[in-house]
Image: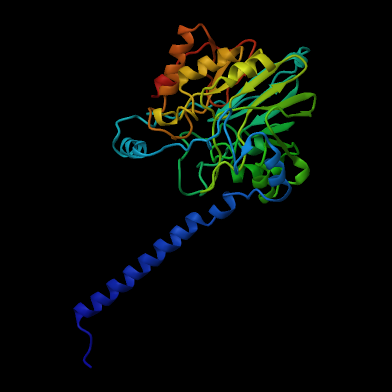
Amino acid sequence: MGAPTERGRRGATGARLAGAAGLAALAGLGWSVRDVPLALGGRLTGARAERALRSPQYRAGAFRNPASSRPAASPTTGSTDRNLLRELFFGKQKRHPSLPVPLVRPTRPPQTSARSRELNVIWYGHASALVEIEGRTVLIDPVWSQRCSPSARLGPKRLHAPPVGLDELPSVDAILISHDHYDHLDLATVRGLTARQEAPFVVPLGVGVHLERWGVPEHRIVELDWSESHDVAGLRLTATPAQHFSGRGLRRDTTLWSSWVIVGAHRSVFYTGDSGYFDGYSAIGAGYGPFDVTLMQIGAYDQAWQDIHMFPEDAVSAHLDLRGGLLLPVHWATFNLAVHDWSEPVDRLWAEAKARDVRLVVPRPGERVVVDDPPPVDGWWQAIA
């Protein structure tokens, strides 16, 4: 057999390079999804499954929305999927700010003689917030990861960094989780808080399966059904209804979703979690209100999702139903989870709040809001839109 030709050598080299590139691509794919199985969380079995079966919200093998015999809605169905995909790839919406989102590094709250009645809120971005109530602290839906996804390398990426690091958070008395979606329950953040904090995780029924798999000690997991409460550090935390769905993989609605009521001796707070607008807000307002401040989900909406995510105008209606005092919007400006402009939710909210004479505050991420003396709305987001 004769010596290989130059063309043959080039072909062999090209094949080797192509093979190496293919192996590198496969390795890269494997690297990008290696954390996915753990991030998917646990499955409802054993004592937790037995407790779910006893819940009034659990029917025909799944948790259900209020007064509904159907499973909780999925985000999109039918032709709406195609419309959303078309808008996602070809729409003209402005889904990123033109300039960096301004961040504020909160300082320690002042020590005052009126601390037993103080109420402050620090919004860290998206749905993550710290409630400082009567000298106690409650951390809500903390997500500090770069992406809200089962993979740390794929999925929706933050529009701004967290204003502070996990290690800079104060000692908290409780960590509240509204449901198990990735933008509200994050593996890396849970692990970081488990190592750095001693507070219990207070979660809706079934969500403990994920925490248990991720190494949270059983004595730090408190699971509640709707209308159930847990007392900690002089506060009462009550799980209240929401209209949404759950699931971190292909199986849906095996864990419950919830809104939350936080009540001290003198002050009270409501947090929507994720929810469509429903008449349950009036019942919550009548049973637990009035509220000094409501933290209301306003972003990631679409006509196809109106049963599970509120429009900004719905958030104002819900706030009034709840008998809320100050409205503080959450669930916007941090992750792109819908096809509207990134700043559209708060523009619509501001207009509706003015039209209906609702007290509104729109803090920058990291800015401490003193509920009794909130800063005026200044439209800061419009300067970077």
| Left or right placement of residue 255 versus residue 159 in this view | right
| Left or right placement of residue 380 versus residue 254 in this view | left
Q: Is residue 370 visible?
A: no
**Residue 359 drawn at (x, y percent):** 55, 10
Which image quadrant for residue 98?
A: top left
**Residue 353 drawn at (x, y percent):** 49, 11
Q: Quadrant of the C terminus?
A: top left
- Would you place residue 20 above or below residue 166 in this image? below
The residue under the point 47% across, 60% down is 30
The residue under the point 70% across, 23% down is 262
| Left or right placement of residue 55 versus residue 273 in this view | right
**Residue 89 drawn at (x, y percent):** 31, 39
| Left or right placement of residue 166 versus residue 363 in this view | right
**Residue 47 drawn at (x, y percent):** 74, 47
- Would you place residue 358 above or below residue 103 in this image? above
Q: Is residue 307 visible?
A: yes
The residue under the point 28% across, 37% down is 90
Q: How is the image coloured?
A: rainbow
User: How many numbered callouts?
Assistant: 0
Q: Nearer the viewer, residue 85 or 327?
A: 85
Q: Quadrant of the N terminus?
A: bottom left
